[in-house]
Image (cartoon, rainbow, N blue to C red):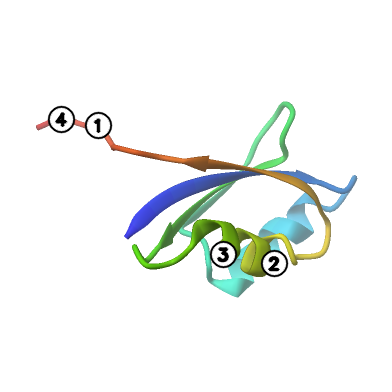
Amino acid sequence: MIPFFVQFKCELGKSYAVANAIAEAEIASEIYSTAGEYDLLVKFYVDRTTDIGHFVAEKVQVIPGIKDTHTIITFKAFGPK
């Protein structure tokens, strides 16, 4: 599985509705509300054969209340050995 993150800007007053819709769709691993330029940070995992661009466009950006997204592709996770 390949992890990646998406930051979300939501329409005013819609961040909790967007977070709940993502949770109900059961497509995300973790969902966080954040302060600053973006309202939500969401971690996704997809199969190695899945096109991340299509996944975001077809499964994520179609959720009502999303104003903008910023996708972050990750390379390697570091931790204790």
Label 3 or label 1, whichever comes before in sequence order = 3
Residue, disc 4: 80
Dot 2 lies on which element? Answer: helix
Dot 3 lies on which element? Answer: helix
- Residue 70 position by quadrant: top right
Residue, disc 3: 55
Label 2 or label 4, whichever comes before in sequence order = 2
Residue 71 picture location, percent across and down: 58, 44
User: Contact, CB < 8 Å: mark 3 with mark 2?
Assistant: no
**Crowd class of label 2 (few under 14; some 14 to 19; many from 20; radius 10 Å):** some
Give the foreground label among 2 and 1: 1
Residue at 39% x, 51% y is 3
Residue, disc 1: 78
Horizontally, residue 65 falls left or right of residue 77, namely: right
Q: Amino acid at mark 2?
A: Ala
Residue, disc 2: 21
Q: Spatial distance from mark 3 to mark 2, Cα to Cα? A: 16 Å
Residue at 84% x, 53% y is 14
Give the foreground label among 3 and 1: 3
**Crowd class of label 4 (few under 14; some 14 to 19; many from 20; radius 10 Å):** few
